Amino acid sequence: MNFIPSNIFTWQNLANLVDILVVWYVLYKVLSMIRGTKAVQLLKGIIVIFLIKLISWVLNLHTVSFLMDQLINWGIIVIVIIFQPEIRRGLEHLGRLPLFSSTSNEEGKTKNHLIESLDQAIQYMSKRRIGALITLEMNTGLEEYVETGIDLDAEVTGALLINIFIPNTPLHDGAVIVRKNRISVAAAYLPLSESNTIPKELGTRHRAAVGISEVTDAITIVVSEETGGVMITRNGHMMLDLTREEYLKYLHAQLADSSNDSSRSLFDVFSIRRGRGKQNEKDNK
């Protein structure tokens, strides 16, 4: 039997390869989005239902098979409702894929001023262990959370951020939300995450930071009042105990070049691993 390479490199085989790669990529992205959320447990439940359906079909359990069929048929609607935050986040991510991008010098200066102001506030509060929760709106709107806060509409400065989070002041309890490079509101309420991947020693501010990152693409900065440690969350990921160099590098990468989503995702994973590695080293000491 003669082996003919031309039979392998056909348009049909190429289409099959592309088909497999697309399905693999979609499954990978879906699993990445729901990792560390309560959706993982729901996914396990769905797998159990399909296993019961398969067993009932093999053993000819007609009643059980019928019930599983009904559950699967109606389950599509239930899944859409239950997985609504993850589905919305995925569709928003697709909608943010840029075709063309341009960043003006003025925007660059504004971003640099924002980062400098954040750095000033973070350094001051971290050294004095003043708790802080700062959320930066990215592409997903934060209107429903802005409505829970107290309007400020002020320029972002380090001094103002420090004064907001001074303990026992009217605005210190809650989150500051930054929109369009201005402080929109203070004392805003963010959704608390129910993820079991959050270390137990982390408090309410940290859970709020992870919670908002699970339903939006916002960047949230937390300063711990217990340790003074700095944490950043985005897209459900936690970057713990960041040094000044690390969080400045991250903020510049995220804010200065908002068009490069793929490089940001790789940096997210790199930063998380570094943060967790550093935390483990501290625990071992």
Image (cartoon, grey):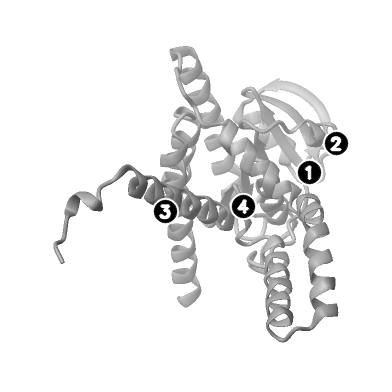
CB-based contact (under 8 Å), mark 1 and mark 3: no
Counting residues from the N terminus, which is met first, the one under dot 1 or under dot 2?
2
Please, what is the three-letter code of the amino acid marked with disc 4? Gly
Real-space CA distance between mark 1 and mark 2, rounded to the nearest whole angstrom = 10 Å
Q: Which residue is mark 4?
A: 236
Please, what is the three-letter code of the amino acid marked with disc 3? Phe
Image coordinates for residue 188, horizontal then vertical, percent: 80, 39
Q: Secondary structure at mark 4?
A: loop
Counting residues from the N terminus, which is met first, the one under dot 1 or under dot 3?
1
Q: Which residue is mark 3?
A: 270
Q: Secondary structure at mark 3?
A: helix
Q: Which residue is mark 2?
A: 148
| Rendered view: 3 above or below 190 | below
Which one is closest to the eye, mark 1 or mark 2?
2
Asked whether the viewer can see residue 131, the reply is no
Q: Quadrant of the C terminus?
A: bottom left
Real-space CA distance between mark 2 and mark 3, rounded to the nearest whole angstrom = 34 Å
| Rendered view: 60 above or below 37 | below
Counting residues from the N terminus, which is met first, the one under dot 4 or under dot 1?
1
Q: Residue at x 47, y 51 (%)?
A: 25
Residue 174 disc label: 1
Image coordinates for residue 16, horizontal then vertical, percent: 40, 50
Which image quarter: residue 65?
bottom right
